[in-house]
Image: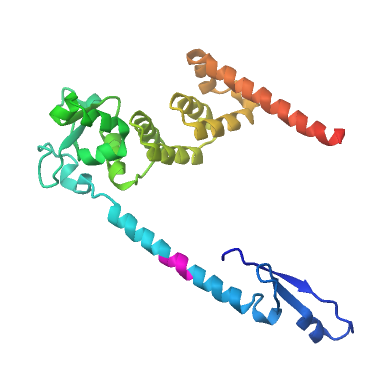
Amino acid sequence: MRGRRCHSTRHPDMSGTDSESEAESETMRCISCREEYGTRDAGTCKECYEEASETEEELKREIEDLKAKVAFLRFWSPLDHHHHHHSSRSHCGPCYTDVVLVAASESGPAGPAVPVPAHKAVLVSRSPVFKAMLDNEMEESRSGTIKISDVSYDALRAFVNYLYTAEACLDEQLACDLLELAEKYQVKHLKAYCEKFLVSKLNWDNSVVNYAFAHQHNAKQLLEAALSLITDNMDKLTKCEEYRELVEKDPRLVVEIYEAYLSKQVNTAALKDSPMKQ
């Protein structure tokens, strides 16, 4: 409402007996215009009320405009149609796609992995890694096939779909898979999206695993949240199987946990001492 607010002020009733007069003497003062208005005016002056209503309508129009722009700018995904889900056709077809991505780890005796169709223009606009790969005369650019290792078909499909729509239906495993891909291909928006989801699912049982995962993939928000949860429950830590595995696999992270815990203890003690010194 453009910074205009009101608060009540009460003028003393000289008679002290007339309740109606006392009610009339209670007023609202606009912080912006400094004018006083009676409480019977709905607690705000007419000018402020009209201005607030105009601002609300203006914001509603802006929101609708933004929604329309988002809908217009949203890329149509070649994965929207069911026949692409398990299609082994050439990627050149009605969708006008000009590149496919393949989950290399899914190729095996059963046959080649199912390709995920895409458009080079979309990949290049979303990822600086894809841009460098496709702008230069690399094998992927010449062959029209990008092989991606250590990823499932479902995760790769969700990744490509996100590049078109900025949408993903996440569970914890998919969020981890997509965060890895987002880190690898520098898709910052997707990484932040997955990280926020994982923070929302954080609990004691998965805190150590998420801490190690966040450390590995430079997910700072998840790392800080997991570390805070761990240091708040240090009495449980040594009983945790994930902790014992971490001691064997990456003792450096264990040292960091204890350093963070000691730092928190020192800060807590300092806060307790400061009122006493004053």
The answer to whether residue 152 shows anywhere in this view is: no
Q: Is residue 58 magenta?
A: yes
Residue located 45% across and 37% down the image: 195
Residues rendered magenta in the picture: 57-61
261 and 220: which is toward the camera: 220
- The foreground one among 240 and 119 is 119
In the figure, residue 102 lies in which quadrant?
Answer: top left
- Residue 218 placed where, x, y %? 46, 28
- The secondary structure that most of the magenta stretch takes on is helix
Can you name the residue that lies furthest to the front here? Answer: 33
On the image, which quarter does residue 89 sit in?
top left
Residue depicted at x 51% and y 36%:
202
Residue 44: which quarter of the image? bottom right
Q: Nearer the viewer, residue 50 or 266?
A: 50
Residue 226 % position (x, y): 54, 31
Quadrant for the N terminus, please.
bottom right
Residue for point 50% across, 31% down? 220
Instruction: Indicate the position of residue 49 as horizontal and vertical percent values.
Output: 58, 75
| Front in this rendered view, residue 66 or 47 | 47
Q: What's the image's color scheme?
A: rainbow
Q: Is residue 98 above or below residue 24?
A: above
- 69 left or right of 203 in image: left
Left or right: 220, with 89 as reference point: right
